[in-house]
Image (spheres, rainbow, N blue to C red):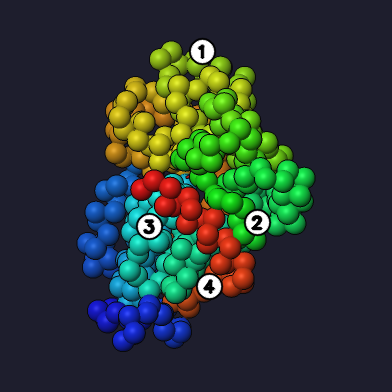
Amino acid sequence: MTELREGLTTAGKVRARRSVLPMPSLDFTPEVARATAHVYERVKDVVPAIEWPVHAPYVKAINDLKTVRNAVILAHNYQTPLIYHGVADFVGDSLALAREAAKTEASVIVQAGVHFMAETSKLLSPDKTVLIPDLQAGCSLAESITGADVRLLRQRYPGVPIVTYVNTSAEVKAESDITCTSANALEVVESFGVDRVLLIPDEYLAKNVAARTKVKILAWKGHCEVHERFTAAELLAFKEAHPGLEIIAHPECPPEVIAIADFTGSTAGMIEHVKDRRPAKALLMTECSMAANIQAEVPGVRFVGPCNLCPHMQRITLPKILNSLLTLTEEVTIDPAVAARARQAVERMVNLRQ
Ligand code: 13P
Ligand code: SF4
């Protein structure tokens, strides 16, 4: 594979060249085995040895192509262990991924995550080529509300600030005063210094923030299809079966689940909590891949169920990432008029506190 880096122009602008590159060999050669041995070390507890010869050539080909395309892969914490450990340049929660997108010097960003995350990257890096390996990777929260809905809310609640969860389309962000993520929702809500704020569209995130602030929160009826399925009853059954169990929940879970949890935080906050506390047994009330991704880093911790898979996150695979880098598709574009307003809302959040 050539060491040539594409894309840097004399003007300093970063642009990816449009050429489609040929499919590399996907044979499991001794060279591939050597080049990927360190990755297998990290995923060996969750990827059977018999499967590794299938995945390793993709890992090697993708990592080679990143150099050729001057590309970075920004991966969400819910991506599969093969992506998280094998090809990602940066892993994190939505807030960390947005911050990384704003500062990367690569020409191409491949978003290993869902569509709203890729749109956020494009908003913060408008001159870069932002690719999503599967355009169908959506989000039930993003689909629960439209820009027209937010305009109606603005009419109905004049003067009330509108805080929009980052899990929304650019069109919805464009109608908002500021965005927030699960990591900073409380801080964003309180940043206005007013007594009423709309926090949309995740009803449970809104309720969970409302329980921690004096600000009156007005909510929308959107839900995450993964987190809404967790119940207090199943949680209590696990607690009884596993004395000393540390329960760690994402704030998209229903309030009755959060009330029982020992800790609530963004996906990055949940990971940090496990690493700090090192409980003997932990239950992550979130997407299944998280526990698999961090198991190797916390060998003394035993993760117990339940967990739910996000079908949208699972659409992103190594073959699709490889195809993205070869063909520079699917490129994320945003109507410039929408982008200008949506960017303001995201930048206000990113600049709130570094
Ligand atoms: P985080 O920002 O906490 O990573 O959450 C994103 C998400 O989609 C959770 O379902
Ligand atoms: Fe959306 Fe829920 Fe999937 Fe996160 S886990 S991307 S909120 S559907």
Q: Residue at x 29, y 54 (%)?
A: 39
Amino acid of disc 4: Glu
Amino acid of disc 3: Glu
Residue wearing tag 2: 175
Q: Residue at x 41, y 26 (%)?
A: 282
Tell me where residue 229 sits by quadrant. top right
| Sequence-first disc among 4 and 2 | 2
| Sequence-first disc among 4 and 3 | 3
| Sequence-first disc among 2 and 3 | 3
Closer to us: 342 or 235: 342
Q: Contact (CB < 8 A) between labels 2 and 3? A: no
Separation (CA) of disc 4 from disc 1: 48 Å
Say if disc 1 is inside 8 Å of ligand 2.
no
Q: Residue at x 41, y 80 (%)?
A: 15
Between disc 3 and disc 1, the foreground one is 3
| Sequence-first disc among 1 and 2 | 2
Separation (CA) of disc 3 from disc 1: 41 Å
Mark number for residue 331?
A: 4
Separation (CA) of disc 1 from disc 2: 46 Å
Mark number for residue 240?
A: 1
Q: Contact (CB < 8 A) between labels 3 and 1? A: no
Amino acid of disc 1: Glu
How crowded pointer 2 is (Cα within 10 Å; few <14, some 14-19, many 20+) is rated as: many
Amino acid of disc 2: Glu
Residue wearing tag 3: 100
Closer to us: 113 or 58: 113
How crowded pointer 4 is (Cα within 10 Å; few <14, some 14-19, many 20+) is rated as: some
